[in-house]
Image (cartoon, rainbow, N blue to C red):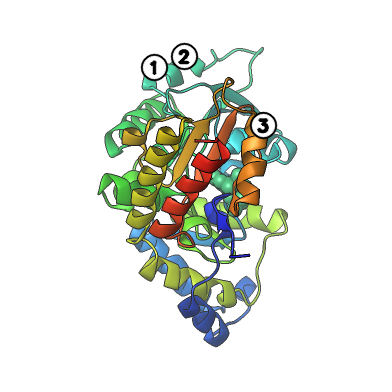
Amino acid sequence: MEKPIDLRSDTVTHPTPAMRKAMAEARVGDDYYRDDPTVRALEEKAAALLGKEAAMLVFSATMANLVSVLAQTRRGDAVIVEASSHLYNNEAGGISVFGGLTPRPVAGVRGRLSPEQVEAALLPSAVLHPRVSLLCLENTHNAAGGTCLSVAQTRALADKAHALGLQVHLDGARIFNASVALGVPAAALAAPADSVTVCLTKGLACPVGALVLGSAAFVAEARRVRQAAGGGMRQAGVIAAAGIVALDTMVERLAEDHANARRLALLLAEAGLGVDPPPEEVETNLVFAEVPEALMDAQAVVEGLRREGVLVNPPRGRRVRFVTHWGVTARQVEAAGEAVRRVLGG
Ligand code: TLP
């Protein structure tokens, strides 16, 4: 059987040949002593690209979010999160488990909060309440459908948060998808935030790694928290080398994934699925589709697709996610569309 068309996630991407070569040849040293030239080169490159003073390599975007949040809060604080955000739902409750933090979930529209909602989520300073100290944003927003926060939206939210005395963390695991889709530099999207997570796996195809970015003082504190989390590194240039190749070669091409996602959304809608956001509003590489109750059981659709050689994750309720990435060609998108049509009996 042919290799499956793997639409489960952009995390399934394999390192490129150039990454493997760079990893094999990387100059390394013990990062505890700041002796690894390749780690330092990646961190400096990323900081410049994101317009921040400093950066730190970590093992995953989950660790980047955890370390960023813990470095900017005190145990017992509350943190405003979007109700369907990755940080709130998909990180095993890390900020509560390790930081003793109380999340304050607020439901946005397509993942976007408004400055008024941020203000309303604040608690009056009283002996009853935890101290609300951080606002967390997500760009692109995964569960909302790969939706982007614009520079103006990010700025308005951060201005409000700062005026209320909160710090701002941006989960920019897919910030380059947002940057490419909106046609603005990633630095402009990162500028309003005090700390930023950037993922090197996902669409950028590294085998491991993410970055934490912010002021030099923030990153120094984040380094201490990373140590506490067992995330200290040694000869990590082997990982960082792939990150450098990713930032040099894998960002601009994300536009292809976005075009493929929009085409796939159209094919899914034509086949009878309820694509939401609708095809013309698909901004990046994530497509969500509801299987209408009258049509078929969502689990049966996923199983049918597997038999056709198309992989997607199990449905959440009736909702199925389709993700385009470097490992999926335009031709495979057409083939996936055909497969969906066959499975639905069209
Ligand atoms: N997202 C993954 C996982 O949920 C498995 C996916 O398949 O989309 N922030 C955002 C917005 C994310 O989407 C993810 C991962 C993370 C953080 C965490 O990244 P990892 O899993 O690499 O630590």
For mark 2, give the secondary structure.
helix
Q: Are marks 2 and 1 in contact (CB under 8 Å)?
A: yes
Residue flagged by tag 2: what amino acid is it? Ala
Residue depicted at 43% across the width and 73% down the height:
245
Circle on res. 116 = 1
Circle 3 Cα neighbour tier, 10 Å, few/some/many (<14 / 14–19 / ≥20) = many
For mark 1, give the secondary structure.
helix
Q: Quadrant of residue 54?
A: bottom left
What residue would you read off at disc 3? 101
Q: Is mark 2 within 8 Å of ligand 1?
A: no
Residue flagged by tag 1: what amino acid is it? Glu
> Total marks drawn?
3
Q: Quadrant of residue 263?
A: top left
x and y percentages locating residue 238 in the rendered image:
58, 77
Q: Is mark 3 within 8 Å of ligand 1?
A: no
The label nearer to you, 1 versus 3, is 1
In the image: residue 193, left or right of residue 184: right
Circle 1 Cα neighbour tier, 10 Å, few/some/many (<14 / 14–19 / ≥20) = few
Q: Identify the residue at the far left of this view.
A: 183
x and y percentages locating residue 30 in the rendered image:
63, 78
Circle 2 Cα neighbour tier, 10 Å, few/some/many (<14 / 14–19 / ≥20) = few
Where is 52 relative to 275, above or below? below
Circle on res. 120 = 2
Where is 344 relative to 328, above or below? above
Residue depicted at 63% across the width and 21% down the height:
130
Q: Nearer the viewer, residue 45 or 127?
A: 45
Q: Is residue 217 visible?
A: yes
C-alpha separation, residue under disc 3 versus residue under disc 2: 19 Å
